Amino acid sequence: MAPDRYDFFQQAFFVDDLDASIAEWDRVFGAGPFVVSPHHRTDSFDYRGTDHQADVSYAFGYLGDTMIQFIVQHDDTPSIYRDMFQPGTFGFHHSGVLVADFEAEFSRLEALGFVCATRLFADGVDAAYFDTRSVNGGFTEIHGSPAHILDAFATWRRVHEARVPGDSPFLRR
């Protein structure tokens, strides 16, 4: 069954420098603070039929109701990021949606003809990236919504809402 609508909770950007991107989005838009996950690893991973994981670091923060994610890839391993960006190029990468029934939404997107480029399990949650560039100019991430993840996201958002000018743009875990 198709959702009535997608409520994108996240917009993600491939960048060359996490700290610089965080500082700039803080200065220009008031985004953050951001939680940084350096050299993130998964419990299981599939990129287009291989288990080759790129060396990536992430940063997560809020801007209003929307989570902003920055991604840096530290190597040249084929990835969903290199699918869109050659070394030295950067920009919008994907929109993310939280799904209650991960397997049903995974099957629905496949039935619509979209290719799952990456599927992973990390931090107790399933995620998959579908190549929807023909529709939105990027990938679409479906992201499971277990309670511990929703609690973490809610905490990050509350910290964002409580920020005052001069607060650090970095949120230490």
Image: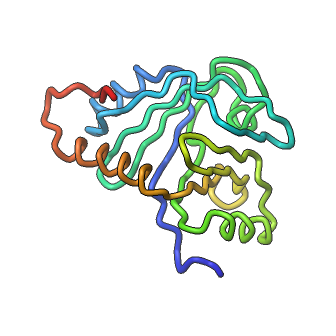
**The N terminus, quarter of image:** bottom right
Name the quadrant containing residue 132: bottom right
Q: Is residue 64 left or right of residue 55?
A: left
Q: Which colouring convention does the figure follow? A: rainbow
Percent of width and height locating residue 88: 64, 21
Q: Is residue 170 left or right of residue 4?
A: left
- Compared to residue 37, the image places residue 62 above or below, namely below
- Compared to residue 40, the image places residue 127 above or below, namely below
**The C terminus, quarter of image:** top left
Percent of width and height locating residue 108: 72, 71
- Between 1 and 6, the residue placed more toward the observer is 1
- Compared to residue 143, the image places residue 48 above or below, namely above
- Count of marks placed on residues: 0
Report the residue at 44% width, 50% height from top. Answer: 149
Report the residue at 68% width, 70% height from top. Answer: 104
Percent of width and height locating residue 124: 55, 46
Report the residue at 37% width, 28% height from top. Answer: 22
Percent of width and height locating residue 20: 41, 20
Q: Is residue 91 left or right of residue 78?
A: left
